[in-house]
Image (spheres, helix red, strand yellow):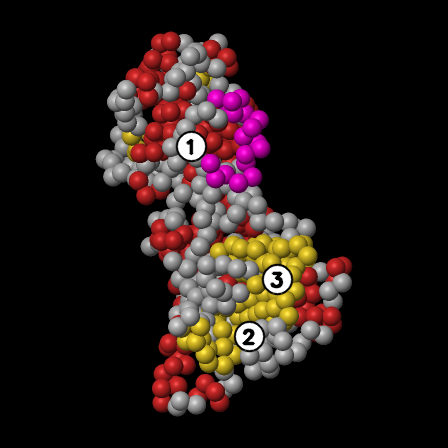
Amino acid sequence: MRIQGRGLRFSRALWFAVLIPLSIPAVSAEEGLSLPPSQDGSGNPLAIIPSAPQEPASAAPQISSPPAAFEQNSLPSLNAAVKSLLEERPALADANRPFSRREREAIASFYAMRDFAPLWWRDGRPAPEAEPVIKRLKRAADDGLSVHGFPQALPPGSDEEIAAADIALTGAVVAYGRQASGSRVDPHMISRLIGAEPEVADPAVILALVSSAGEAAGEELRRFNPQHKGYEALRRRLIQLRAGRGTARRDAAIPAGPVLRPGMKDPRVPLIRARLSIDEDQDAVFLEERNGAKDLVYDERIAAAVADFQRANGLPASGNFTARTAAALSNPAPSHLEAEIIANMERWRWLPRDMGQSRIEVNIPDYEAVVVENGEAAERFRVVVGKEQTPTPVFSETMKFLIVNPYWNVPPSILRKELLPKAASDPRYLYRLGYEVFTRGGRLVVRQPPGERNALGRIKFMFPNDYSVYMHDTPMRKLFAESKRAFSHGCVRVDDPFRFAETVLGRANGWSEQRVRKLIGGKERYVYLPKPLPVHIEYFTAYVDEQGELQLREDVYGYSRKVRAALGLEG
């Protein structure tokens, strides 16, 4: 089971001793089946639990008696109804996609090891977990999730009715837990240069944790969502955006008018503020408007929010409110902003649950690297990232050492596409540029020695990875003055690299910027970090900054658009 950081919590559950000897099949997202629409009126595709495979009796799991916790709650007729419905292939809800065969088998196995006792019904009444779980499922949209087809309550009924409701609720809990932990979008389908792998929860782990959590079951289910501060901030902004206050005002089209620049007054300003969800008490705004005292000034704060919106929507980010901006902002609901927030929340599910209290985060669309110490941003550095044609990969690794005075071994792709064609017409081309040319193991090697002109500058930061990319200095300092800094072949160029070295090595460990600079020379010098640092190369086009403001960035590689499409949020 690959649920990082949850194993210890799982050991608290009553199920721990039961699940250890049971072999639950691993779940593959590639084994989904195309099934007919549901019969519950939701129109969502529902997955079906198959009858148990016909195997020799000796191969079946041997459960001599159900666990003591179930024995007092087991009613033979109700258990038989659950078993019968499982064998008759009842529907289980997952609004995003049908359950795979292995998911269905895992759910069926979970019931089997309970002797088919219901999960959410005990002693003739709903279990303590049922109500909080249903409440959490009703709020699935708060986390950008889509779960349908579950019972809105568990009222008394016949054994068959209770069994059907119990199984449907189980399916919804599994659907929520797996969606929350990243099952909806396969990052590799967005781009082969995304190496992130969501830690999708196993159905047995979801059910064991939630069904044993008592009145905290709803919160236990919600914890399958990312717990990172960045995710929680976007979640709060999504809820705020969807709040009922001012909904009609946010949905209203913005009328035509002159181009607005900071300092101008215009009656459209309240509409613009509402559509961009600029923080304010909407009720107070309406009261002020009724009293005729509302300030209609198009101020710098509104202009900054408009510039962010323009940047995210491929418009010139001038901050002036133009006719094109008005048309884009008047787009019908669901708003582009809402979809963009959900797409970014989804990408948080791709990151490790434990990112490290101290770490390095590089946000590609923001052209920034942040060194985090004890959970807080300590230093920020401008970076240059890969061009659209040569994107910087998205992945997580560990920085272990840095090299001062590095050689640059020219990658085969650059050698083939750029240097060799020029060398074909000028045999002395590479030598005149100072490159060293030799063969190693029958392969041509071209490398640039250390020095002022070296493409890596004076220092590079190593975190071994499958993409052969790293962070490094650069002699092309002028690029850091650009607002859009996508110029590299994939590596991340760092502004002020020796201050960056001091930060990652730690002044407290005796590594000041001056000490690192003293290593400059003609020979490679390796310096190992006192403690390796996790490095997360991320792709967030929407985030909430330290002042609580929503920031939007251009979708440099088009990944956000693809995630929105995968989630059904485009168009």
Q: Check disc 3 and report the residue beneath it.
A: 401
Comes first in the chain, label 2 or label 3: 3
Residue 471: in sight, yes or no? yes
What element does badge 2 sit on?
Answer: loop
Going 26% across and 22% down the picture, which residue do you hit?
54
Residue type at mark 2 is Tyr
Give the residue furthest to the front: 441
Query: On the image, numbered disc 1 is attached to which residue?
Result: 203
Q: Residue at label 2?
A: 407
Where residue 477 appears, as percent x and y from the top left, is: 58, 78
Image spot of residue 370 (x, y percent): 61, 60
- Tell me if I can see residue 310 in this picture: no
**Would residue 87 be counted in the magenta stretch?**
no
Counting other residues with Cα less than 10 Å from the Cα at mark 3, is it few (<14), some (14-19), or many (20 or more)? Answer: many
Q: Nearer the viewer, residue 264 or 46?
A: 46
Pointers 3 and 1 in contact (C-beta within 8 Å): no
Instruction: Identify the magenta region.
Output: 1-18
Q: Position of residue 402 (x, y in %)?
A: 61, 65
Q: Is 386 on the left or on the right of 56, as rendered?
A: right
| Magenta span contains residue 8 | yes
Label located before the other in sequence (2 or 1): 1
Q: Nearer the viewer, mark 3 or mark 1?
A: 3
